[in-house]
Amino acid sequence: MLSIRNLSKNFGGVAALHRCSFEVKENSICGLIGPNGSGKTTLFNLITGIYKCDCGDVYLKGEELTHLKPHEVARRGVGRTFQITKVFTKMTALENLLVAASKTGREVEEKALELLDFVNLLELRDEYAGNLSFGQQKLLELARVLMLEPELLLLDEALAGINPTMKLRLLELIRHLQKQGKTFLIIEHDMKAIMPLCEKLVVLDHGEKIAEGLPEDIQRNERVMEAYFGAIKC
Amino acid sequence: MRRVIAALAAILLLLPFFASPYITALLLLIFMYITLAESWNILSGYTGYVSFGHVAFFGIGAYTAALLITQKAFPWILASLLGGIVAVLFAGVIGFICLRLRGPYFAIALLGLNEAIKVIATAWESLTRGGYGISLPPVPDLRSIYYAMLLSATAVVLLTYRLASSKFGLRFLAIREDEIGAEGIGINTTRYKHAAFILSSFFPGVVGGVYAYYLSYIEPESVFSVSITVKMIVMSMFGGAGTVLGPVIGAASLALVSELFWAKFPYLHQVMFGALIVAVVLFIPGGVVALLQERNILPRSRRV
């Protein structure tokens, strides 16, 4: 589904991402982990075209995404949420969804209401997004990106900063969407929550991929332990 | 609501036949400021790209019309429309360059641009007669000017109304809210920004032409004056930027107040504008419209 090949990005002298390659299988959930500053969000920004890569390629279902602009990547079926949500705070929850649709009309509105219902925000549809809690904004952002009917969803710290009940709800939604055929690449620090969800984990440290594999193998991987302990010591 | 609008339209259409020339002249200036503030609002209120050089379109329209009237003997209405079209062409080119800039950089680039055009208009004496300015034939009938300004104001308000209640307007707002977020949901922000920029340049160009004809005399300092841009900004923000009615309310009320005060306190009313913009930003960042919406006097709709 998604294929990252040799992707590199430097900021000045800092290698934010160095020759990173991996695949995400169709209809799977892949976790992307690593200490702070390891290059996870940089990778998302490269896939979605916000940054231009220095070298390497990104392919989605065999089609190259590498040099596309962010809005083109979105239209090709890659939906993305942000670490700090980017909902439109001065628009209502419903408007946040409608603005993402390429058409207008009754059908679009029905779809938007359906999605708001899906993330339990139907009653808050006319509330300004800025008045919603952080967790609700995360859900709203997910619903908004689903308006585009993406095949691949990139979630940046999907679970950070939201309460345990909301967390369970969100995990449930992700599973449900996977059943509908969607593919996920998820950045997350809460290992306990994400381990049972993912079929595969990719671990980054200082811009390099240091491990890739089944969650239970990654847990025992020495380089991963080192990377995390090192990060804690600093 | 429809009846109120119909009554207002009837009054405004018939007014010049009853009112004194003073009232007619005052109203036509108010319509001009409504046109300017609402145009500024289409770009800056909706997409958040704050323009500090919007008077450039007004000045370009004024000079285009003045030259066409004096040198090519064009009728003033056609000359003014062409003023709007030249402003649009200009915006098309400038937008291509300037809309890559964000936030304060965009604002400052347009401020500088207007100053540059003012200098060109002053220095290019063979075409513009520089600082001597251009004199136009006198206006035979104030009413025709009144109707031209009324028509411009109505057209730009209707345009904004249409935009605001369409997907287009919502996408402009998305750019204002978070441009990267907007791109993330597949919005081609470059295209929408460009569209907003061009839409916001036409009517200032047109009323610039009408204004030149009305005054019978223009010179660079008066039609490229930064104070006109400042008025557009203050009027829009006072009424409510990013709303349909905000700039109308702001332009009408401030133009009236300004008219009442400037004769008695020619300098003080400039100070007042400055103080007002500070007060608006501090106390009613959403403007009068947002205030009325909070009190439930106006509905919370994008059509307002």
Image: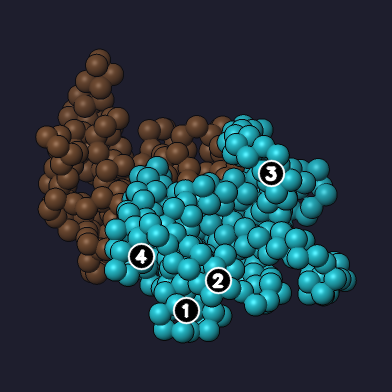
Chain colours: A brown, B cyan
**Label 4 neighbourhood size at 10 Å, few (<14), some (14-19), many (20+)?**
some
- Give a yes or no on whether discs 4 and 2 share a subunit: yes
Say what secondary structure mark 4 lies in.
Answer: loop
Q: Residue at x 46, y 84 (%)?
A: B73
Q: Quadrant of residue A12?
A: top left
The x and y percentages for residue A143 are: 54, 55
Q: Residue at x 82, y 74 (%)?
A: B17
As measured in the structure, the alpha-carbon distance from the residue carrying label 3 to the one carrying label 2 is 24 Å
Which residue has dot 2 on it? B213
Chain of the residue under label 3:
B
Chain of the residue under label 1:
B
Q: Amino acid at mark 2?
A: Tyr
Which residue has dot 4 on it? B129
Earlier sequence position, callout 4 versus callout 3:
4
Q: Amino acid at mark 4?
A: Arg
**Which of the numbered marks, if any, corresponds to residue B263?**
3
Say what secondary structure mark 2 lies in.
Answer: helix
Q: Quadrant of residue B299?
A: bottom right
**Which of the numbered marks, if any, corresponds to residue B69?**
1
Earlier sequence position, callout 1 versus callout 3:
1
Note whether residue B277 is visible.
no
Looking at the image, residue A185 sits to the left or right of residue A16; the answer is: right
